[in-house]
Image (spheres, grey):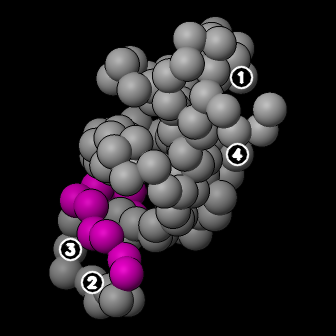
Amino acid sequence: MVDIYEKLYEYKKAGQDAVIITVTSKEGMSPADVGKKLIIGSDGKFFGTVGGGAIEHYAIERAKQVLSERQSCSENYVLNDKNVSLNKDDVKLNMACGGNVTLFYEFVGPKQYV
């Protein structure tokens, strides 16, 4: 098992940016559990998981945007393969499991938290 904190240390030591993605809330059925983490570095490599499937694929792509913007953010995802009503900032992902998941994307530059 990969320790994402060790990976974060390696990125910081190498002077590279990274994003830590954390599942901060979950409602209903979902492959994501609160506290799961995934880290992606500026080299495009990623370690850990936020649940797999469409949510993980989307999270990795969103983390690449966070890396380029260098700005942390939080997003809510509705996991449903049916038509559902969304709040203004929700992202709908086609996953049969259903439920809602919130992910926090934390940008970590090599000079932060020194």
Q: Which residue is mark 4?
A: 35
Of mark 1 and mark 3, the one earlier in the sequence is 1
How far is the residue under mark 1 from the one under mark 2?
37 Å
Q: Quadrant of residue 27?
A: bottom right
Q: Name the foreground residue: 71 vs 6.
A: 71
Label 3: few (<14), some or many (≥20) within 10 Å?
A: few
Q: CA distance from mark 1 to mark 4?
A: 14 Å
Q: Which mark is residue 5?
A: 1
Q: What percent of the width, then of the height, locates residue 98? A: 39, 64
Which disc is residue 102 wearing? none
- Residue at the extreme right: 114
Q: What element does badge 1 sit on?
A: helix
Q: Tag 4 or tag 1, which sits nearer the N-term?
A: 1
**Marks 3 and 4: in contact by CB < 8 Å?**
no
Tag 1–tag 4 contact (CB < 8 Å): no
Q: Residues within 10 Å of mark 1 (few under 14, many from 20)?
A: few
**Residue 16 showing in the rendered view:** yes
Q: Is residue 98 magenta?
A: yes
